[in-house]
Amino acid sequence: MTLLENIHGPRDLDRLSQEQLTRLAEEIREFLVAEVSKTGGHLGPNLGVVELTMAVHRVFDSPHDAIVFDTGHQAYVHKLLTGRQDFSHLREKGGLAGYPQRSESIHDIVESSHASSSLSWADGISRSFQMTGQRDRHVVAIVGDGALTGGMTWEALNNISDDNSRNLVIVVNDNGRSYAPTIGGMARFLNGVRTRRSYRHLYTTSRWFADHFGGPVGRAFYRGFRGGLHGFLSRFSNNEALYSNLDIKYVGPVHGHDEAAIEEALRQAKDYGAPVIVHVITQKGRGYEPALSNVEDQFHAVGHIDPDTGEPIGGSHRQSWTSVFSDQILRLADGDPTIVGITGAMLIPTGLDKFAAKYPERVFDVGIAEQHAVTSAAGLAYGGLHPVVALYATFINRAFDQVLMDVALHRAGVTFVLDRAGVTGPDGPSHHGMWDLAILQVIPRIRLSAPRDAERLREELAEAVAVTDAPTVVRFPRGSVSNQLDAVRRMPDGVDVLRDAPHKDVLIVTVGPMAEMGLQVAERLAAQGIGATVIDPRWVVPVPASVIELAAQHRLVVTIEDGIRVGGIGTRIRQDLRAAGVDTALTELGLPDVFIDHASRAEILEEAGLTPQNIARDVVAQVLGSKIPVARPLPDDAEEQRRLGADRQ
């Protein structure tokens, strides 16, 4: 058996020698490459934290000591060391989650994938331990250096430093990257430490002495030299000055792939009896050449890949939603010099990289700072520009107040492009973009669009950036674009009619790529003799007038969206129908207001009842009057029932 196979919990690490720990680190990296290449996942970040995670679990006693990851995508090694070594269904339904998950293990605490929150968690947990007399318990927050670009981190540090008698260790995992290279003044400071020749030279010199003399003498010299090195470098690089005003002890920088060095620094921090920052310099993608050679993001997240070459295996050859946006925003920017781009540490994932490559002075990566990004966009709009803020849909949740009070209140012309909207699938509850429609539609004057295919994305993005007096939103899902669905006609207010029916029984209102499902439902209804008109409003908020007019002509309205039902587009249409005096029955279909676990998009939609078969079955029952809401009767309902009966025969 391998060393890894004999690790069933953190305490199994205690009996290993330094030589065995080195071999275990190699086995873990081999395991990660072999397993994650089959399922996809966050490979690069986890290859970089192997020794760090081992050291944390040797020094601290989880779960008695609380370990918090920021963010949790760097917790694969933690899962391995806490007895979870079946990665065969990682990020798949029924398999291990890609982030910490309390239902999996008592060693997991924070499940959210949103960055920069760990220090606030650590502040609360450590304060709770102190107030309840649990003074033998420690809290460890492992913070990726990208998370330091988020404002919550510094708000938490400010509060932690106000009460410096708690057992709290903050480990800064400094690899110079979040998704891509970390940006900003803090990043420049840490990069200066990481690349300083004195650090690299002194470290390698100490290693040479240890290797040259060998045995107890060499190891004793190395330990002593390394301790002096940490103190010297912290003063020489002025790192202590960075945190001294916060009254927090600083230890480091520490070589992030020297397990013994990290362990020693962590023991010092643990024994200090007050908050300590341990600065650990790691290498993302460590030990795997294809990751190290990847300039874009060092395999931050991969799909199925060849473990030997790192090349993608299979996958769709169709264009992705992100790439369509990437090409179109550049095309629009070529023709309009007022268009600028903003993103939060996601230049490549959101598709702004082409824009930035051609017009670097017009694209701003603000780090993991969505609140700042949105308010800065309001300022750019005030100055005469049109900002396009590109984020994952889940992250707009963090900036709601800024969209409401800084953008909308001031009638700022800002466009928000929300990638990964709706069901995202394998990354779990905090990555689903299912709340954006419900959250954002309450904002006065906002305009929300949901393109159904690539052509509509190009079209609606162009329309969005033309709006100068209100916020606009263009949202689209993860993955490959849907099949192109051309309208049979377009209403004067821009609503696309995708299917007309001779009998005005059901009006199906689809949101974005749910249009394809709506058409499939209509076909099933037609087979039952029920006429269904299918429309795509394109701009779903405010509700176009023709949607109300068409609803008045039908017996039942069915809305289909991939956001939550509560407060969704269906609810908005229902309210507008009642305000207009239209009494057509309406059933709104969407996602339940629960946290949805990781699974494929198809599995999640099926569990929510969002399949053509399920929807058609319910609609038939509603038209026939056996299921609520019951379709509105026609003036000659008896004749209508005879028609339906004849058609179904």
Image (cartoon, rainbow, N blue to C red):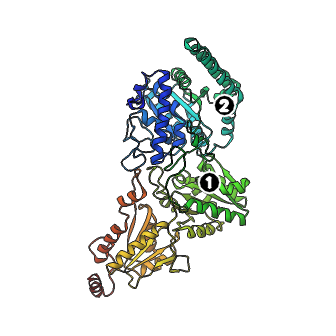
Lateral position of residue 607 relative to residue 349, left or right: left
Q: Mark 2: which amino acid?
A: Leu
Residue 379 higher or lower than 9, as above or below: below
Residue 427 higher or lower than 191, as above or below: below
Q: Mark 1: which amino acid?
A: Val
The disc placed on residue 292 is none
Point out residue 164 in the picture as x, y percentages from the top left corner: 55, 26
Residue tagged by mark 2? 242
Farthest residue, direction front: 308
Point out residue 103 in the picture as x, y percentages from the top left corner: 36, 42
The kind of secondary structure element at disc 2 is helix
Residue shown at the point (50%, 42%) measured from the top left: 73
Lateral position of residue 199 relative to residue 627, left or right: right
Residue tagged by mark 1? 374
Point out residue 421 in the picture as x, y percentages from the top left corner: 50, 58
Point out residue 161 in the picture as x, y percentages from the top left corner: 57, 30
